[in-house]
Image (cartoon, rainbow, N blue to C red):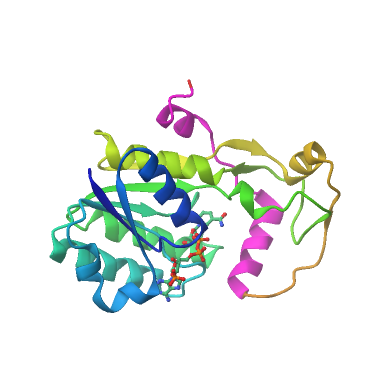
Amino acid sequence: MRRVAVIGGHGKTGRAVCGALADRGVDPRPLGRADWPDLARAVAGCDAAYVIAPNLRPDEPAYVASALDVLAEAGVGRVVYHSVASPYVPAMPHHVGKAVSEDLVRRSGLGWTILQPGAYLQNLDLCGPLELPYSPDVPFGFLDLADLGRAAAVVLTEDGHAGATYELATRVATVRELADEAGADVRQVPDPEQHPWLSAMFVYYDLHGLPVGTRVLAALLGRG
Ligand SMILES: NC(=O)c1ccc[n+]([C@@H]2O[C@H](COP(=O)([O-])OP(=O)(O)OC[C@H]3O[C@@H](n4cnc5c(N)ncnc54)[C@H](OP(=O)(O)O)[C@@H]3O)[C@@H](O)[C@H]2O)c1
């Protein structure tokens, strides 16, 4: 693997993937909005692609389908799709969009791998008081973005990962546990109602959190 296109590669997820690829001697090609009008030219010469959809994309399956079509036409035969932990949750519409997209990836005819990341540790600013629109006492499988990058680089550069779907978490904790470790206060506040999909997610989080096991990531990264 010499060159990998990272579609959606300029955001925080893409930067972590590109950095880890570069650490393995692979040339990452981060692609953003400006590349979509001629995505085929942008991915030409790449051996594989990592596909990240923008946050809360209303038509994520259409976005993923377009990317898959372009990759197939451009002769890029290997794809890794950035999904989410527990995509098959009917109560969270943006998760369901990823479940539908996973099906497209599996039927794309490309050599595929799907990563299902837990909530990023970096979503939480533990430097000061933390206000959450859901319970701080429910369990999450949190994922460090550096680990996400490392896992992406492993599945892109090593054999044996085509046809695999991996849930990824660095550690399981409640937000209160993380806040206590950091010496930060945490309290639950009302939903700011910024987006109906986020509101649905907060209701689900409040009841169930988003637990994810840690053993798959540990195995991928050789952490015993
Ligand atoms: N936050 C979490 O805890 C978490 C957990 C699991 C999965 N995820 C998933 O991770 C993804 C988000 O990654 P992120 O936070 O790194 O995103 P981000 O920082 O918002 O970056 C978004 C990337 O997508 C591109 N983009 C934005 N709008 C676009 C459009 N209309 N058409 C084409 N490209 C567009 C941006 O291009 P430009 O370079 O042009 O700006 C940028 O490269 C989402 O799919 C989310 O569901 C997040």
Q: Residue furthest top?
A: 224
Q: Residue furthest bottom?
A: 37
Q: Position of residue 51 (x, y in %)?
A: 35, 58
Is residue 136 left or right of 12 when viewed as pictured? right
| Residue 207 point in image, percent of width and height | 69, 53
Is 222 contained in the magenta span? Answer: yes
In this picture, is 131 found above or below 141?
Answer: below
Magenta residue check for 96: no
- The structure residue drawn at horizontal position 48% and vertical position 55%, both measured from the top left corner, is 13
Say which quarter of the image contains residue 129.
bottom right
201 and 45: which one is in front? Answer: 45
Vertical placement of residue 86 versus 194, above or below: above
Q: Residue at x 49, y 29 (%)?
A: 215
45 vs 60, nearest the viewer: 45
Compared with 84, 140 (above or below) is above
196 shown above or below 106:
below
> In terms of secondary structure, what is the magenta stretch mainly?
helix
Assign the N terminus to one quadrant of the image.
top left
Residue 50 in picture, x, y percent from top left: 33, 54
Query: Is 73 positioned to the left or the right of 93 in the image?
Result: left
Task: Evaluate whether residue 88 shows in this view.
Answer: no
* The quadrant where residue 67 appears: bottom left
What is the total number of numbered labels drawn onto the structure image?
A: 0
Residue located at (23% from left, 45% from top): 2
Q: Is residue 205 visible?
A: yes
Coordinates of residue 116 in the picture (x, y in percent): 45, 48
Point out the stretch of residues depicted in magenta.
196-223
